[in-house]
Structures are given as structure tokens and as C-alpha cells.
């Protein structure tokens, strides 16, 4: 169905694999459009799905936006290209699903930007991270100048973006750019374990937990905690809240119904 990505679903977890290994999964417009289509037609409308794991085929997660495509763009071309990229990132960020990046190799430029728009980042010890754009005469254009300071603070974001210095996985972990690092062979099994663990929790709580963090972090603490209080009531009124607490009292595993 797709040429540049693969998508499959196992239970409540979807697996989206970037599949242009000969170009180190560089993000060109057709690939971005396929990701968008997959989000719009396979992932977001799927009520059963809780988590989506994103990873790359071969030795890269994504080695950036496609330099061959971009090299002849003028202002209008870049404006369109950034719009297509931004839409993918917004769609993931505002989705009810939880996106986990399993960063298997190079996560450079637009690839790191895409990883930063996921909810959780796990990485192989062999992964390499960086925003090489200033060395190409541009800046990160898929949200990197905005999401990176929110993740690692503005000093470190300026260091990485302005110096265009690549960093290894242990440094990415140290600065909070990724949540965990694993030996290469352990990355996918550990990612699957995490995705299935999240998928086994109360779906309404998972969904509003993500929204509360994403909405609240962009506003003042009074508005943010007010928002938390309102969405908390959604969980409090759910059947799954009764099930979760009853299961605890009865010393058994809960059986959540997304109700
Ligand atoms: N775009 C296009 N092709 C790429 C890219 C890329 N970003 N990265 C790698 N490739 C291709 C190479 O051209 C090569 O193709 P071929 O075999 O046909 O020559 C193939 O992938 C394998 O790459 P290498 O032979 O270079 O492999 P190495 O192991 O020697 O090096 C590196 C791996 C270090 C990852 C190297 O390929 C590299 O530096 N790639 C470019 C990394 C980069 O600069 N990325 C940032 C791009 S800019 C960006 O992402 C901007 C985002 C915001 C854009 C918003 C604009 C609208």
C-alpha cells in the first residue's frame, strides 16, 4: 500500500516503519504524505489502538529531510515543504494515541524533529543525534527550534542547533533528549514491552494524561492545573475508574473497557 513506510498492527499497538533504507530514510515529500495518510486513515480513526511505535528500517531512524529534494527549493518550495512536515508533527502531538520513537540509528535534522514530536523516545546505544541544518545554510524547519528547547532547555538547544554538533546516545540520554537507551538488540523488545504496558492501562486515563501534559506545558500553571482538574473528571466518571479501583481492592488485574 505504501512505498516509503510500512504499517502493521498487533493488538492495541501499531508499528510504523520508515522504509527508504538506501537514503537512510531521508524524509521526502512522498514519505511525509504517506506518514500523514497513515495517521489519518489507519491510526487516528482506530478506536482499539493505544500506542504507535515508530522506527527505521536499516541503519537509520531518519537521517533528516531529503537534501536532494530541498537543494533547489526557493522560498515558496520551502514554505510548502515545512507545511507538510509540520502537519505530520502536529497530527502526532494532538493525537489520542501515544507515539513512541524507537531510535535505532541516525536521528538527524528532520528525523530528530520527528522524534521530538513523539511522546516518548527510546534509543539504541548506537544511535546518533543532531541538527546539522546550520551547516547546510538553513535552520531546523519541522519544529526543532521550538520542541528542542522545551525538551532540553534553551542553552542546550542553542548549543546543539547553532553548533550543529552531533551527539551519541549516552549524551542524548544525559540531557533528556531520550528517556532510555538500550543495547541495539534490546531496543525493539523493550519498546514493545513499554508500548504493551501503556496499552494495558485505562485508555481514557492514558489519553487525557497525554493531553493534560501537552496542553498544560504551553500555558500558565493556574490555567494548566484547571485543565487538569477538568480532564481528571473525565477519568473519575469512567467505568474504567471503577474497574481499576475495584480490581485493586479485589487483588486482581483490571479489565479496562475504554468506557
Ligand atoms: N537526504 C538525502 N539523502 C540522504 C540523506 C539526506 N538527509 N542522508 C543520507 N542520504 C543518502 C546519501 O546521499 C547516500 O545516498 P547514495 O548512496 O545514493 O550516495 C545514502 O543516504 C547513504 O548515506 P552515506 O553514504 O552518506 O552514509 P554514511 O554512513 O557515509 O553517512 C550520514 C551517514 C552521516 C548520516 C550522512 O549520510 C549524512 O550526513 N547525511 C545527511 C545528514 C543531514 O545533514 N541531515 C539533515 C538534513 S536537513 C534537515 O533535516 C532539515 C529539516 C527541516 C527541513 C525543513 C525544510 C523545509
Image (cartoon, grey):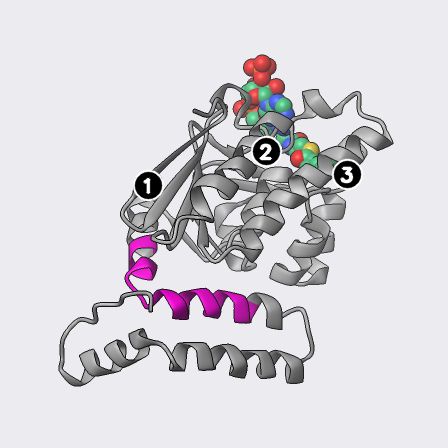
Q: Which mark is residue 47?
A: none
What residue did someone put label 2 on?
32
Residue depth check, mark 1 versus mark 3: number of the one nearer the observer: 1
Residue 207 appears anywhere in the view: yes
Mark 2 neighbour density, 10 Å: few (under 14) some (14–19) many (20 or more): many
Residue 102 appears anywhere in the view: no
At x 72% / y 60%, what residue is drawn?
155
State yes or no: Cβ of the residue under disc 2 lies below 8 Å from any atom of ligand 1: no
Q: Main secondary structure of the magenta part?
A: helix
Query: Image check: 154 left or right of 130?
Result: right
Residue depth check, mark 3 versus mark 2: number of the one nearer the observer: 2
At x 46% / y 80%, what residue is drawn?
232
In the image, residue 57 lies at what x, y percent?
Answer: 42, 29
**Which is nearer the eye, 173 or 259?**
259
**Which is nearer the eye, 253 or 143?**
253
What residue did someone put label 1 on?
9
**Which quarter of the rendering shows the C terminus?**
bottom left
SS at circle 1: strand
Q: Earlier in the sequence, mark 1 or mark 3?
A: 1
State yes or no: Cβ of the residue under disc 1 lies below 8 Å from any atom of ligand 1: no
Q: Which mark is residue 134?
A: 3
Q: Is residue 180 magenta?
A: no
**Which is nearer the eye, 205 or 54?**
205
Residue 42 picture quarter: top left
Query: Image check: 202 left or right of 70?
Result: left
In the image, residue 34 lies at what x, y percent?
Answer: 53, 31
Residue 81 picture quarter: top right
Magenta-drawn segment: 195-213
Q: Earlier in the sequence, mark 3 or mark 2?
A: 2
Structural distance between the alpha carbons of marks 1 and 3? 38 Å
Structural distance between the alpha carbons of marks 3 and 2? 22 Å
At x 26% / y 67%, what residue is drawn?
256
Amino acid at each position: 500500500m505504501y512505498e516509503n513506510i510500512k504499517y502493521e498492527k498487533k493488538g492495541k499497538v501499531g508499528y510504523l516503519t520508515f522504509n527508504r533504507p538506501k537514503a537512510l530514510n531521508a524524509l521526502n515529500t512522498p514519505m511525509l504524505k504517506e506518514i500523514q495518510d497513515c495517521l489519518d486513515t489507519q491510526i487516528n480513526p482506530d478506536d482499539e489502538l493505544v500506542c504507535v511505535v515508530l522506527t527505521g528500517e536499516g541503519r537509520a531512524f531518519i537521517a533528516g529531510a531529503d537534501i536532494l529534494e530541498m537543494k533547489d527549493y526557493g522560498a515558496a518550495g520551502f514554505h510548502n515543504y515545512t507545511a507538510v512536515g509540520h502537519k505530520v508533527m502536529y497530527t502526532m502531538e494532538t493525537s489520542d494515541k501515544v507515539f513512541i520513537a524507537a531510535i535505532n540509528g541516525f536521528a538527524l535534522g528532520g528525523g530528530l524533529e520527528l522524534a521530538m514530536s513523539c511522546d516518548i523516545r527510546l534509543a539504541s546505544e548506537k544511535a546518533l543525534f543532531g541538527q546539522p541544518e546550520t551547516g547546510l545554510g538553513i535552520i531546523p524547519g519541522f519544529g526543532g527550534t521550538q520542541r528542542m528547547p522545551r525538551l532540553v532547555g534553551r542553552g542546550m538547544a542553542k548549543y546543539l542547533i547553532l553548533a550543529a554538533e552531533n551527539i551519541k546516545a549516552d549524551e542524548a540520554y544525559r540531557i533528556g533528549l531520550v528517556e532510555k537507551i538500550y543495547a541495539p538488540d534490546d531496543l525493539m523488545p523493550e519498546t514493545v514491552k513499554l508500548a504493551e504496558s501503556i496499552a494495558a492501562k485505562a485508555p481514557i486515563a492514558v489519553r487525557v494524561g497525554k493531553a493534560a501534559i501537552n496542553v498544560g506545558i504551553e500555558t500558565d500553571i493556574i490555567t494548566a492545573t484547571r485543565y487538569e482538574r477538568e480532564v481528571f473528571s473525565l477519568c473519575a466518571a469512567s467505568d474504567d475508574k471503577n474497574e481499576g479501583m475495584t480490581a485493586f481492592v479485589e487483588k486482581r488485574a483490571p479489565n479496562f473497557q475504554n468506557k
